[in-house]
Amino acid sequence: MNVLVELRKVVKDYPMGQTFFRALRGVDLVVREGEFLAITGPSGSGKSTLLHLMGALHRPTQGQVLFEGLDLSSLSPDELALLRNSKIGFVFQQFHLLPRITAWENVALPMLYARVRPAERKERAMAALARVGLLEFAHHRPNQLSGGEQQRVAIARALVNNPKLLLADEPTGNLDTQTGREIVELFRSLNEEGRTVVIVTHEPEVAAAAERIVAMRDGLIQEERHVC
């Protein structure tokens, strides 16, 4: 499989008054196309920082993050925004749906930024909602949906521009156990269709659904293992 994302000796510092917090301490990691990777570790271990760097949301303090061989540090903010919108889909614990618009309109938002024509936006948004099993809820607003349904809308939104990489940060964290299992199965099926999926989680059951698990501690990769 081709390399999709590569981190080389990545360090990430965050300012804290007169000092700084080192979230990552020289991380090397390769993610290949079509892989399903889980990143685990306790709070403060650096797993979400790692995800944000993969998704071009943050820049490393030191080292390199490469996407399809391209060093992300060489891109302007506008170029990074274009890459995120066209090649990376994000799913977060808090859903981040706009409350005053419908499910399909939330799903269509990334296409608005990509300047897709209105008729095509609606068609593709509906197709994405159908893919996650929510077509019948297309005209519901977020407060009319359960937590699991809202997360499916968020996944549909992440998929609508057909990204190469799907990044999920604690996607089951606000869900009950059964709903969480259903969301994990959805990610697994998306991966089986060829999508590259990286999930950050503290839940062993969620991590076990992946092909490979990377365990973080104190800003370093402590262990890597393949799931049988």
Image (cartoon, helix red, strand yellow):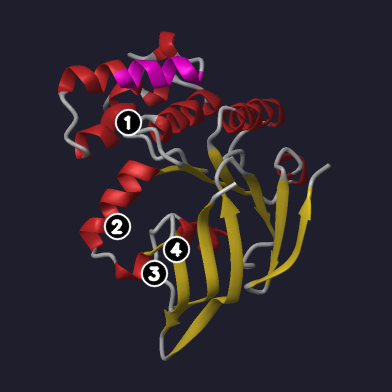
Q: Earlier in the sequence, mark 2 or mark 3?
A: 3
Disc sitting over residue 59 in the figure: 3
Q: In this view, does 104 lie above or below 91?
A: above
Is mark 3 in CB contact (under 8 Å) with mark 1? Answer: no
Q: Name the residue under label 2.
A: 80
Q: In this view, does 21 lie above or below 94?
A: below
Quarter-wise, where is residue 186 in the image?
top right
Asked if the stretch drawn in magenta spans residue 206, the answer is no
Question: What is the x, y in percent for residue 111?
Answer: 25, 33
Question: What is the x, y in percent for residue 118?
Answer: 16, 22
For marks 2 and 1, give the CA distance.
27 Å
Q: Magenta residues?
A: 124-132
Which amino acid lies under the numbered mark 2 shown in the image of this protein? Answer: Leu
Mark 1 residue element: loop
Q: Name the residue under label 1.
A: 99
For marks 4 and 3, give the CA distance.
11 Å
Q: Which of marks 2 and 4 is nearer the N terminus?
A: 4
Mark 3 residue element: loop
Q: Earlier in the sequence, mark 2 or mark 1?
A: 2
Which amino acid lies under the numbered mark 1 shown in the image of this protein? Answer: Pro
Q: Name the residue under label 4.
A: 66
Whether residue 102 is visible, yes or no, is no
Is mark 4 in CB contact (under 8 Å) with mark 3? Answer: no
